[in-house]
Amino acid sequence: MKNSRGFLCLVVAVTMVSLTGAAAYAGLGDKLKKKANDTANKAANDALNKAPETPATKPDETGTPPQTPGSAAPAEEVSRVSTKFDYVPGDKVLFYDDFTQDELGEFPAAWQLKTGTFEVAELGGRRWLRCTSLDSDIRMKLPAMAALPEYWTLEFDFLCEQASGNVLTVYGRSGEQEVWSAVFPVSGRNLYFTSGQVTSDTPFEGADVWGVPHHVMFMARGKALKVYVDRQRMASVPEINPAPGAPTTISYRLWSDKQPMISNVRFAEGNKPVQDPFADGKLVTYGIYFASGSDAVEPESAPVLRQIAAYLTAKPDVKLRIVGHTDNQGVPEGNLDLSRRRAAAVAAVLTAQFNIAADRFQADGKGDTVPVSDNAKPEGRAMNRRVEFSKV
């Protein structure tokens, strides 16, 4: 998809009626919403109405169709990203949806509706799933499994154009029982996490909460769970509540009259910590990000590149071959050129920002010629967008 920086008109149509009332959500969430709504006063709304119409966009992963041709320097150097941001996406994609396979105005086929009214909408050339009811509950149609994998990651873009209350809640559920929940934003800009008796309330450090997209990430490693918003670690729980049992599903609640939206939802298995990333001689990663259509390495790539730099520093005799891969969207010649430029850009960042000698890298790209999964499916295309490192 080709994104423009300007906001275009939303193309929408109401698709489904609310299945259950908002009264089903009583308790802590309602108290938090009241607290947040008290904070979101008229002055804040007036300021938001004057905000620029060009929100920042989340960088797409390797091989996504271009947003703006050419290269652009990232807003922050990769090496300067805080080590507290350690999110690395899983490498086995179980679910991916950017809503490009659905008709505008319809409810997306890959999702289950429990409560609320939703529609696929277009904003700035991107597809979003927009909530048009006051409350909601939706769930990904994941492959059949008794429980979520022991190691998994979830990431998606979230946007609410105007100030509101506790707009977004993500739940880990065992059946219908809540195991954990993350609410954003509480009191106008905090993330509130709860799991049993464990709670945290963390202020968001970004400049803007409303009117710009945010990238929300979850990383589970066994019983531990971390939550991030835009490279800021917002929650780190060593053990989630064991009482309800292991989570079996994830549900999303969009709760606002400001029509909040989500997009680019990716759920994957993997990321079990390893001592030697090159134990098999090759590292395949989905954790190197680029601005759409660009070869500029984005700061979200820091965790993976720090790991590679540390490995090369400890093993000064090792040299690596870096190969970029894309899905089959777009023109093959363009995909090939972009994959080569991106591989070269990764080598350049490791040299310039992590002090690894340039002669220790060979950079190449294969475009869409070496798929590892079916390009006919969104999950397959997400698997094909990758960067591979191998020992020379």
Image (spheres, grey):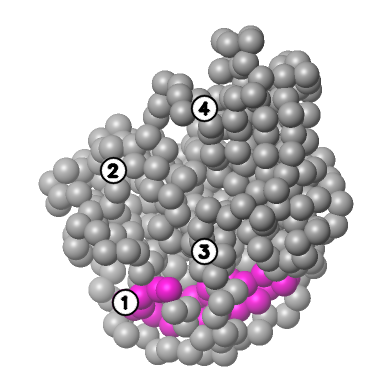
Q: Which callout, 4 or 2, points at the residue further toward the start of the chain?
A: 2
Amino acid marked by disc 4: Gly
14 lies above or below 375 = below
**127 magenta-colored:** yes
Amino acid marked by disc 2: Glu
Q: What span is in magenta?
A: 110-133
Residue denoted by label 4: 281
The N terminus sits in image quarter: bottom right
Residue denoted by label 3: 374
* Residue sitting at x 62%, y 21%: 309
358 lies above or below 221 = above
Residue denoted by label 1: 114
Q: What SS does tag 4 mark?
A: loop
Amino acid marked by disc 3: Asp
Q: Which callout, 4 or 3, points at the residue further toward the start of the chain?
A: 4
- Contact between marks 2 and 1 (CB within 8 A): the answer is no
What is the CA distance from the residue labelled 2 to the residue labelled 1? 26 Å
Residue 234 in picture, x, y percent from top left: 46, 40
